[in-house]
């Protein structure tokens, strides 16, 4: 046969198993998404918080290594508590006394108030005041929980909002379903392949940096025994990532499958998050006004109205379940959030399966 | 030789509408044209054959695999080119073909090599490196064609393959289909409205109307007239010659320019009779050949039968 024959030639070779073909859809999806310059920029930005949390891990190790720092913190905390509890007899004198405190003390007070607004910070402060064998476990877990909850969950919202809405809606618009399903693959492989695309990006901005932070902490501690004491943290990171991935990717893909226009899916995605969390924030503000306290103060956050309505926010539900994953809450405290997320994931997957089969049914 | 496709009493209902009504047929290897008016059930039949939709009742086999039970196995042996202007967004031409090859199970590197080979066969040049969204409809047809054959399937199903192609590209595509059948031994099922395409390349025709098979026959048989018939091409209109032929008891159909005649009659020496009459009348015959039945006539009569049966 001539070398440059351009006629048709048959093909014989070993085919890859059907069970692995979902990865072809994922791989191609990831490659197409990464062509977007905006996605690449966003992913770059998503890694900035790691530096901040890495600094916190470094400071913790310095603190653990220097007993005089521990003593100072213990003393300062005690003094701050005494200042806070000081009662001069009437409210006006108390206010005047606090107003005339030295600036350094007032700054410390502000730090303390800000820290108190973060969930489960009291557990961390207690652990730091009397350092023991489990201090690193508690503080690392708390740092990772806040890392997942604050910067990365918000980044995830934007990243998924960029990536997922076009994944199925563009296939619907370009009628690509027939090209997929005329091959020996089914709905399951198609949906799994598509789900893995946002999942990989979510894992890349959450699981990977969290594991890097953990390894960084272990390396700084200079004690190998620390691995034995914190062996469960990498598994908790994986579980927390999974909890972020399953509901978010399913819901985003469901929205994508409901329309041919990816911008509608993007709008619905952001609306879903903003409306729920916005409504809850409105309740928080109303309670803050009625209690005459700062919005995220302990009294406001522990009020029954704020606690009960917290369930309407997807963001809060994710945060609550992650708090359980990192060992700061019991399952009995967070089961409503867990059930809501499970229900939403299930509904999203059911809708997704139905929508994906629709074009081939007719 | 076992049939390529054999279906028995297939019924497919979409809620109250019956898309396929007791469809039974067998298709032998070769090129088969699937004909039918809009809404005849052609696309539904193709989806049934590929195992994409479940039949309400009936059974069948495609390439020896049972319908409904072995859909994936069937699809792994089939190359399908859909009618719709469909593409996988965000991919370049060669990537789209590679992606199709990978979905069919070819490893990635080999799929890329194979994609280039197939795109060469399809006459696709540097435009293969452009994104599909920038392609014309004709170029997308080529990509769909390449994606359908890249995994070297046994059976090819083409749904309106020549739609939206210019005459030159249409001829090229039909040539490629013939090469696939003749040289590579592929069997092809073409669903089309363009009857000359079927006339040009098909061995068999399957006419579907109102969800039922109206005709399933080889084109050779279909083209054969019921009585011996010849077509005669004259230099000019020859009224006396025509009248003489009619006087001899032959049926003569004239074309609109009166130069093309279709002469039929139950005579063994029909052509000799025509030559002799022409000589007697001093008529110059430019061409004389055995006549074929027009596929259009066959198609129209099958559709009319279906309409009469429906009413």
Image (cartoon, grey):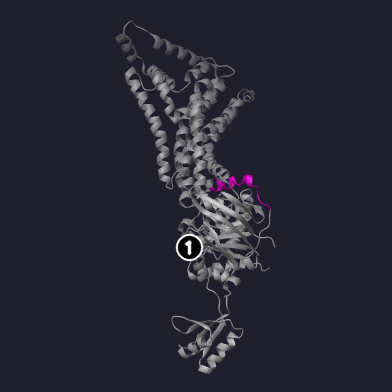
Report the residue at 58% width, 86% height from top.
B271
**Hey, which quadrant is residue A298 in on the image?**
top left
Residue A56 at what x, y percent from top left? 50, 27
Output the chain of dot 1: B
Q: How many marks?
A: 1
Q: Is residue A55 positioned above or below B24 on the image? A: above
Residue B241 at what x, y percent from top left? 49, 90
Q: Between B188 and A204, which is closer to the camera in this rendering?
A: B188
Element marked by disc 1? helix
Q: Which residue is mark 1?
A: B308
Span shown in magenta = A14-28
Residue B164 at what x, y percent from top left? 47, 64
Q: Which quadrant would the N terminus of chain A be assigned to in this image?
A: bottom right
Report the residue at 36% width, 7% height from top.
A87
Q: Residues within 10 Å of mark 1 (few under 14, many from 20)?
A: few
Q: Residue furthest right?
A: B1
Q: Is residue A3 positioned above or below A251 on the image? A: below
**Prevailing secondary structure class for the magenta stretch in the rendered image:** helix
Q: Between B278 and A181, which is closer to the camera in this rendering?
A: B278
Tell me, yes or no, if residue B32 can be seen here. Answer: yes
Q: Between A307 and A227, which is closer to the camera in this rendering?
A: A307
Tell me, yes or no, if residue A297 can be seen here. Answer: no
């Amino acid at each position: 046969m001539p070398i440059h024959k351009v006629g048709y030639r048959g093909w014989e070779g070993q085919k890859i198993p059907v069970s692995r073909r979902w990865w072809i859809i994922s791989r191609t999806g990831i490659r197409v998404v990464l062509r977007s310059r905006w996605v690449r920029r966003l992913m770059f930005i998503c890694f900035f918080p790691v530096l901040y949390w890495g600094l916190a891990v470094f400071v913790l190790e310095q603190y653990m290594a220097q007993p005089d720092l521990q003593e100072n913190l213990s003393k300062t905390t005690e003094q701050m508590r005494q200042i806070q509890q000081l009662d001069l007899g009437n409210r006006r004198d108390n206010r005047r006394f606090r107003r005339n405190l030295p600036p350094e003390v007032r700054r410390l007070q502000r730090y303390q108030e800000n820290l108190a607004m973060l969930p489960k910070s009291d557990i961390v402060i207690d652990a730091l005041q009397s350092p023991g064998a489990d201090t690193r476990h508690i503080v690392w877990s708390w740092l990772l929980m806040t890392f997942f909850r604050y910067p990365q969950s918000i980044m995830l919202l934007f990243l998924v909002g960029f990536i997922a809405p076009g994944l199925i809606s563009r296939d619907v618009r370009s009628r690509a379903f027939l090209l997929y399903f005329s091959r020996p693959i089914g709905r399951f492989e198609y949906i799994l392949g598509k789900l893995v695309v946002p999942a990989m990006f979510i894992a890349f901005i959450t699981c990977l940096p969290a594991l890097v932070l953990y390894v960084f902490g272990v390396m700084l501690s200079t004690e190998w025994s620390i691995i034995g004491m914190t062996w469960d943290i990498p598994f908790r990171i994986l579980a927390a990532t999974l909890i972020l991935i399953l509901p978010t990717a399913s819901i985003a893909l469901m929205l994508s499958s409901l329309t041919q226009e990816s911008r509608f899916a993007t709008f619905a995605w952001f609306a879903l998050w903003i409306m729920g969390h916005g409504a809850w924030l409105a309740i928080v503000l109303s309670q803050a006004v009625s209690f005459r306290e700062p919005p995220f103060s302990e009294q406001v956050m522990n009020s029954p109205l704020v606690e009960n309505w917290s369930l309407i926010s997807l963001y809060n539900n994710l945060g609550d379940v992650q708090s359980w994953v990192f060992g700061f809450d019991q399952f009995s405290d967070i089961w409503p959030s867990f059930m809501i997320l499970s229900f939403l994931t299930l509904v999203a997957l059911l809708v997704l399966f139905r929508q994906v089969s629709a074009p081939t049914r007719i | 030789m076992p049939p390529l496709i054999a279906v028995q009493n297939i019924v497919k209902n979409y809620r109250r509408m019956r898309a396929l009504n007791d469809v039974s047929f067998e298709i032998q290897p070769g090129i088969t044209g699937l004909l039918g008016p809009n809404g005849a059930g052609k696309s539904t039949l193709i989806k049934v054959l590929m195992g994409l939709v479940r039949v309400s009742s009936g059974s069948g086999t495609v390439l020896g695999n049972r319908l409904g039970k072995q859909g994936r196995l069937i699809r792994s042996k089939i190359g399908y080119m859909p009618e719709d202007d469909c593409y996988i967004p965000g991919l370049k031409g060669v990537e789209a073909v590679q992606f199709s090859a990978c979905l069919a199970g070819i490893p990635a590197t080999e799929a890329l090599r194979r994609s280039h080979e197939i795109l060469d066969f399809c006459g696709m040049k540097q435009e293969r490196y452009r994104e599909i969204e920038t392609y014309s409809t004709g170029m997308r047809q080529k990509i769909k064609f390449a994606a359908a054959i890249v995994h070297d399937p046994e059976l090819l199903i083409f749904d309106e393959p020549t739609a939206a192609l210019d005459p030159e590209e249409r001829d090229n595509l039909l040539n490629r289909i013939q090469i696939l059948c003749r040289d590579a031994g592929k069997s092809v099922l073409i669903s089309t409205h363009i009857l000359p395409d079927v006339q040009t390349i098909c061995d068999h025709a399957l006419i579907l109307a109102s969800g039922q098979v109206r005709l399933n026959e080889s084109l050779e048989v279909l083209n054969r007239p019921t009585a011996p018939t010849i077509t005669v091409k004259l230099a000019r209109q020859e009224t006396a010659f025509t009248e003489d032929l009619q006087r001899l008891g032959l049926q003569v159909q004239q074309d609109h320019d009166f130069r093309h005649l279709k002469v039929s009659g139950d005579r063994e020496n029909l052509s000799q009779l025509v030559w002799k009459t022409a000589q007697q009348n001093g008529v110059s015959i430019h061409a004389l050949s055995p006549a074929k039945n027009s596929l259009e006539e066959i198609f129209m009569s099958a559709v009319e039968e279906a309409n009469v049966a429906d009413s």
